[in-house]
Amino acid sequence: MARHENVRVDMARLWSTLMRSAEIGATPRGGLRRLALSEEDGQMRRQFGAWCEAAGCTLHVDAIGNMMALRPGTDPDGKAVLVGSHLDTQIKGGRFDGVLGVLAGLELIRTLNDHDIQTRLPIAVVNWTNEEGARFEPPMIGSAVFTGEKSVDFACSRTDRDGITLGAALDAIGFRGGDTIGPAQCDSLFELHIEQGPRLDAEKIQVGIVTGAFAVRGFIVEVTGETGHVGPTPMPARRNALVGAAHVTLAVEDIGWSRHETGGKSTTMRLKAEPNLLGILPDRVEMTCDLRHAREDVVAQMMDAFVQRIPDLEARSRCRIAIRESWSYGGMQFDAGCIGLVRAAVDRLGASHTDLLTEAGHDAMHVARHLPTAMIFTPCEDGLSHNEAENVTLADIEPGVNVLLQAVLARAL
Ligand SMILES: [Zn+2]
């Protein structure tokens, strides 16, 4: 047992793997553009698959393109310990968001091979399809299909801005698989990820033990006005939907500020105006908004606060304002047993650490409703993410990667 506890990953090899990934979809400013199921994603998937097979794993691909590279265990009935994250990126994304979690999983397998360590349970390195949602909405759709929360048909019928369906995109890169893998075949999930926030870097803390997730409420607001000529239409007669949208944006912003001292956040992140032309008052705006807080009841209060503002926003803009669709996720605690393994590994390694909640969405949040799940955060420079300048050093990630190895080993042995 002591022997296993002294095992460490080969950081130089992991780094060279990360830097190879950083070439596939590289942007001129040092980031990555590797949209889900694009040509670049296909190339990265083939590279990842080749690495996994070279490490002795058997590659499984399901109907939504989730990749699972399986290293068998000694127990023929053993369920797989999943380790992974995502290889797709934002349009102007960084080199480590998601990628670190997948390639650290691969490095973990290579390390077990180097030390000839057999585990009782199989270990599967997973690459979830379309985590970012930058090409196909909603995000995290691969893990939602894995858990059964979304159907394969629903997922494959999502379209990108060019009208290409997710199913067609899977076919185009050859990643519509035939394997059926769900929570029933799996034991647990460990996801390592960069923090994507500033705390660990600012406080020089090596490892974030993620105990749960912020509660998130997203909603689409529809603002309805009336078209008219921007010249002759008198000010009192105007019903400009963009003015309504401006009032909504500021009201949503106020709600985040009213809760920011306890970590609350609010965002208006997208706006579609119609007809969106010169010379004409817009008559319709659709906007997507997002409220976040550690506590689910507070997010509910934030939502109520917005709903109560609507009549006033309507009066000020002379537009109709309605919430057309809303959704929520997060707000859960991760598994105490898996967190305990992470905590024990952190203590053994002597890494500085803190407990925190994830404020971003992750596949682990879908999976956590079905399997024991834990997340580990590493620092990233200035907390910057979803940005081409996203950066980590080898020293930033070394403690977290070894914590992942030790926690997974403790679960699988
Ligand atoms: Zn990510």
Image (cartoon, helix red, strand yellow):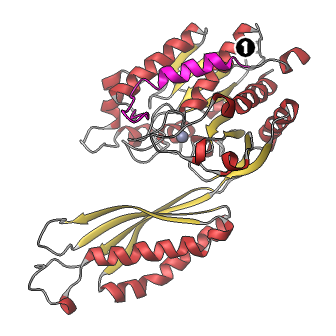
Q: Quadrant of residue 371?
A: top right
Q: Is residue 5 above or below residue 358?
A: above
Kind of residue indicated by mark 1 = Leu
Whether disc 1's CB lies below 8 Å from ligand 1 is answered: no
Q: Position of residue 381 (x, y in %)?
A: 59, 42
Magenta stretch: includes residue 96: no
- For residue 312, above or below residue 52: below
Q: Is residue 146 visible?
A: yes
Q: Start and end of the magenta stretch?
A: 9-34
Instruction: Decide whether residue 18 is among the magenta residues.
Output: yes
From the viewer's perspective, tell me whether residue 250 is left or right of residue 212: left
Q: Name the residue located 60 percent from the left edge and 12 percent from the top edge.
A: 57
The quadrant in which the C terminus is found is: top right
| Residue 196 visible in the displayed image | no
Taking the image as shown, residue 52 lies to the left or right of residue 296, namely left
Compared with residue 293, is residue 249 higher up or lower down, i.e. above or below?
below
Q: What residue is at 69 percent from the left and 52 percent from the top?
A: 357
x, y (%) of residue 176?
40, 25
Q: Which residue is located at x 60 percent, y 50 percent?
A: 197
Residue 10 position, x and y percent, is: 69, 16
Q: Which residue is mark 1?
A: 112
- Work out which residue is located at the far right of the displayed protein and give it: 2
Tell me how many marks there are. Answer: 1
Residue at image location 79% in from the left, 43% down from the top: 353
Pinpoint residue 273: horizontal percent, then vertical percent: 25, 65
